[in-house]
């Protein structure tokens, strides 16, 4: 049999792989939506709340790796624990809708060798942003043996073999609870600003207030006006504002916090 081919005598299996860190508020909905998989595996990054207990009570296979070294390292650890022919990576603040479940199951049954991207349905501050047009698509479903590794501390990407593996876009969308509260959004803002700035520093990019203003302003106008945030009320405004602030502060941190960025990859 060709390497990587699905045994015709056995139905292909699916692992849903989840990263967690203090996700007690969201993890139950996330894991219940993943319960159709043959294996649900969680890698926890040292939660101090009830995340691990909730995950285990729902039947997930939980592994703790508290020595945080970035998102790519944690996803590689998920891969080490995954046993399915296919792996779908699910974040703890995401929920697989019934429509997406049906599409994932059909792909797994097909045995196709490809990488599948999925788009989000955004939820922010307790409201689904129904008029917001999210165009970004993230790679989430893979044949397990095709993934060599993940790279990157933030906005990490999978290195697959062969490199010219076909990319497909799934029709159904993934429900993403992006921001629950102002307090949580401010904490998330700090984390992603410093990780994003460190990534740009490693690439030799320059920062500054003017670069930050240009990036943040362009981001806000694009999301609020072109992507329909303006049609989503106060929640839409806040969502676009926080994403724009992240873009602004990445470049100002790149200028004013540059000497300390190398140590900011920790949680």
Image (cartoon, rainbow, N blue to C red):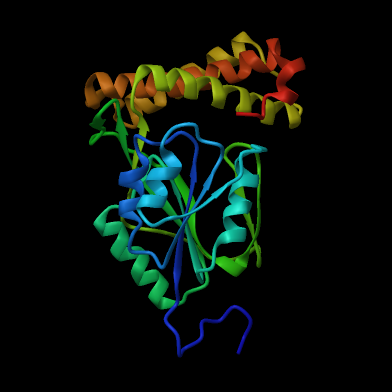
Q: Identify which residue, 111 or 223, lies in the foreground.
A: 111
Residue 243 lies, in percent from the top left, at: 45, 24
Figure label count: 0
Where is 161 relative to 21, above or below?
A: below
Q: Quadrant of residue 165?
A: bottom right
Q: Identify which residue, 145 or 59, lies in the foreground.
A: 59
Quarter occupied by the N terminus: bottom right
Give the residue drawn at x 63%, y 81%. Answer: 3
Residue 221 relative to residue 260: left or right: left
Give the residue drawn at x 52%, y 72%. Answer: 113
Q: Is residue 205 visible?
A: no
Give the residue drawn at x 30%, y 45%. Answer: 29
Give the residue drawn at x 38%, y 58%. Answer: 170
Q: Quadrant of residue 149?
A: bottom right
Residue 7 lies, in percent from the top left, at: 51, 86
Residue 240 relative to residue 15: left or right: left
Q: Identify which residue, 71 or 59, lies in the foreground.
A: 59
Where is 224 relative to 208, above or below?
A: below
Residue 171 lies, in percent from the top left, at: 33, 57
Residue 180 lies, in percent from the top left, at: 33, 27
Q: Is residue 219 visible?
A: yes
Where is 20 relative to 255, above or below?
A: below
Quarter occupied by the C terminus: top right
Q: Identify which residue, 230 or 226, lies in the foreground.
A: 230
């Amino acid at each position: 049999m060709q390497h990587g081919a699905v045994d015709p005598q056995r139905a292909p299996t699916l692992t849903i792989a989840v990263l967690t860190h203090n996700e007690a508020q969201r993890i139950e909905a996330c894991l219940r939506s993943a319960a159709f998989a043959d294996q649900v595996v969680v890698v926890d990054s040292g939660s101090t709340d009830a995340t691990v207990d909730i995950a285990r009570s729902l039947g997930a296979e939980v592994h703790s790796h508290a020595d945080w070294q970035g998102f790519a390292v944690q996803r590689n650890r998920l891969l080490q624990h995954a046993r399915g022919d296919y792996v779908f990576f699910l974040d703890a603040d995401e929920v697989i809708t019934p429509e997406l479940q049906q599409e994932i199951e059909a792909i797994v049954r097909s045995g196709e060798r490809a990488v599948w991207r999925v788009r989000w349905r955004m939820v922010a501050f307790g409201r689904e942003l129904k008029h917001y047009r999210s165009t970004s698509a993230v790679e989430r479903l893979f044949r397990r043996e095709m993934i060599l590794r993940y790279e990157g501390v933030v906005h990490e990407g999978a290195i697959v073999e062969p490199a010219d593996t076909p990319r497909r876009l799934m029709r159904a969308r993934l429900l993403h609870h992006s921001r629950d509260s102002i307090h949580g959004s401010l904490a998330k803002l700090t984390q992603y600003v410093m990780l994003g700035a460190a990534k740009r520093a490693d690439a030799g990019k320059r920062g500054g207030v003017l670069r930050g203003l240009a990036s943040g302003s362009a981001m806000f106008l694009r999301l609020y006006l072109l992507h329909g945030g303006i049609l989503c009320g106060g929640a839409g405004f806040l969502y676009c504002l926080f994403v724009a602030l992240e873009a602004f502060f990445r470049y100002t941190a790149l200028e004013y916090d540059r000497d300390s960025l190398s140590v900011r990859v920790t949680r």
